[in-house]
Image (cartoon, rainbow, N blue to C red):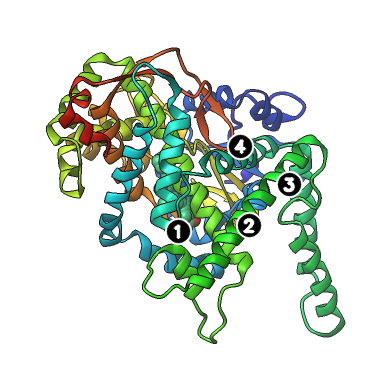
Amino acid sequence: MKFREMPVAPGGEGFLGHNAAFRNDRMGTLALLTQRTEPVLRLTLPMPGVQAMAVNDPDTVQEVLVEKAKSFGKSDMLRFSLYNLAGEGLFTSNGELWRKQRKLMAALFTPRALEAYAPDMVACAKRTVAGWADGRELSLHAETTRLTMGVAGKTLFDADTFSDADEIGHALTVALEWTGWIMGRPLAIGHVTVRRALENLAERFEGDGARGRVRGVIEAAIARLHGPVALLGKRGGDLARAVAFLDDHVQKMIDDRRRAGTRGRADLLSRLLEAHDEDGTGMDDRQVRDEVLTLFVAGHETTATSLAWTLYYACRNPALYAALEREVDAVGDSPTVADLPRLDLCLRAFKESLRIAPPVYIFGRDSREPVSVAGYDLTRRTNLLISPWALHHTPSIWPDPERFDPDRFLPKNEAARHRYAYLPFGAGPRVCLGNHFAYMEAQLAMAVLLRTYRFELLGEEEPEPSATLRPKHGVRVRVRLRDHARTMAGAAVLN
Ligand code: HEM
């Protein structure tokens, strides 16, 4: 079937089509997809010659992300929006570079490597609660961010980020908010359109000699258009300052490590600095910087957000909250890897929060060659939007989707569902590298937090769709030290 025969997604009726719809009401536009049963829906965009569509059912997710994964790459729009922060890091890169780096970094996420991170995860959770006091009001999202940032810094880079957590957190927030804001704006659309036109032009100059030289010039121009050429206005200035701060921080880490040496250390930074190609060339500082910032952001932002959402939903369900406390109390003050099977409800609640409020609520792919999807013929560079949030809120897949129910993740219920109906970590070769890391961190952090304090919710939440799906008000709570944590024996909880 021809692409133009594909049914059009609802919501894009205005002059600027779905582009305006997503900008004005992102969640409302995604919600419209959940009402439709077609596997794919065409999106209307004000960009001549650009084809875009939404993937709207688990079978088609499987077709695109798993079976035909080789025909797709990370989307130009995502790469443009994240370029200042993540450059050519693992999350945004494509092709050979991605393959090589993924293999290198996978070594940090083997089951054995993960086990070794558990004590640091528990230590960071204890350090977080040690900063609270009985009766204090706080933002759980800010606290879970401090916690997961500490874990990412320690386990991945053997660095202590706690002391600088607020400054780093602020810089990352500025950079991520810019990413969420710029996506789909005229500046980003302009860049992507010009880049594509240049790519089409370059293809016409095959061969050596003068043709090859022209092609070289065009390709050099394309390389400059991966990210914004200039950062203008207040937002642009804020982003430039935030990125300069992060660059300085990472460069200092690299310099310190080069001075201290990498021998005997197995963390990511040492691996990146030790890595060599077959011809003996090492990774340049720019690539190391891109990988460090990518992993640092990917490794803490999403987990912090989903931990805050999990605790929010737990607070709203007293029976669930009481059951979680019973579970963590049975484990005691210092959970270890061996306790993970006993923290099953924590895991199921965390999984359910990733269903109802997936931090990565949309992601994209661009086709790299002509390919068919759900029976429709796509040309090269068709843009595909995949929304875990929309899939997770489709009533035909998830009955009563607004109800928070960890039992959806009991083994028998998981087995009865389509494997790709649940997509918080993506799927296929580009599935999240840190999914098991996140599960383990969430279980251990919940065990410490819920064992030490009780949370009283101070207000309702709603999702704020930026680069990730954060809780708009940060999950405001009052914390109450639990009785056993007040006693002398309980003091050990905080050590
Ligand atoms: C609840 C927590 C997390 C969520 C919801 C999440 C979600 C995702 C998603 C959806 C993708 C795939 C995007 C796509 O296909 O376009 C992804 C990729 C990735 N994630 Fe996560 N993530 C989480 C935690 C982590 C952690 C803890 C780490 C590292 C410590 C991590 C590292 C990465 C990396 C490196 C990639 C890129 C993989 C590649 O393209 O090869 N993530 N994540």
Q: Nearer the viewer, residue 172 or 3?
A: 172
Tell me the residue that label 2 is attached to.
87
Secondary element type, mark 4: strand
Nearest-to-viewer mark from 4 and 3 = 3
Residue type for callout 3: Ala
State yes or no: discs 2 and 4 in contact (Cβ < 8 Å).
no
Q: Nearer the viewer, residue 216 or 234?
A: 234
Nearest-to-viewer mark from 3 and 2 = 3
Secondary element type, mark 2: loop
Please tell me in which quadrant of the rendered image residue 60 appears.
Answer: top left
Q: Nearer the viewer, residue 248 or 9?
A: 248
Mark 4 closeness class: few <14, some 14–19, many ≥20 residues within 10 Å: many
Q: CA distance from mark 4 to mark 1?
A: 43 Å
Q: Which mark is residue 42?
A: 4
| Residue 292, visible in the rendered structure | yes
Mark 1 closeness class: few <14, some 14–19, many ≥20 residues within 10 Å: many
Q: Quadrant of the C terminus?
A: top left
Residue 378 in the image: state x and y as whole percent.
Answer: 60, 51
Tell me the residue that label 3 is attached to.
240
Residue type for callout 2: Gly
Nearest-to-viewer mark from 2 and 1 = 1
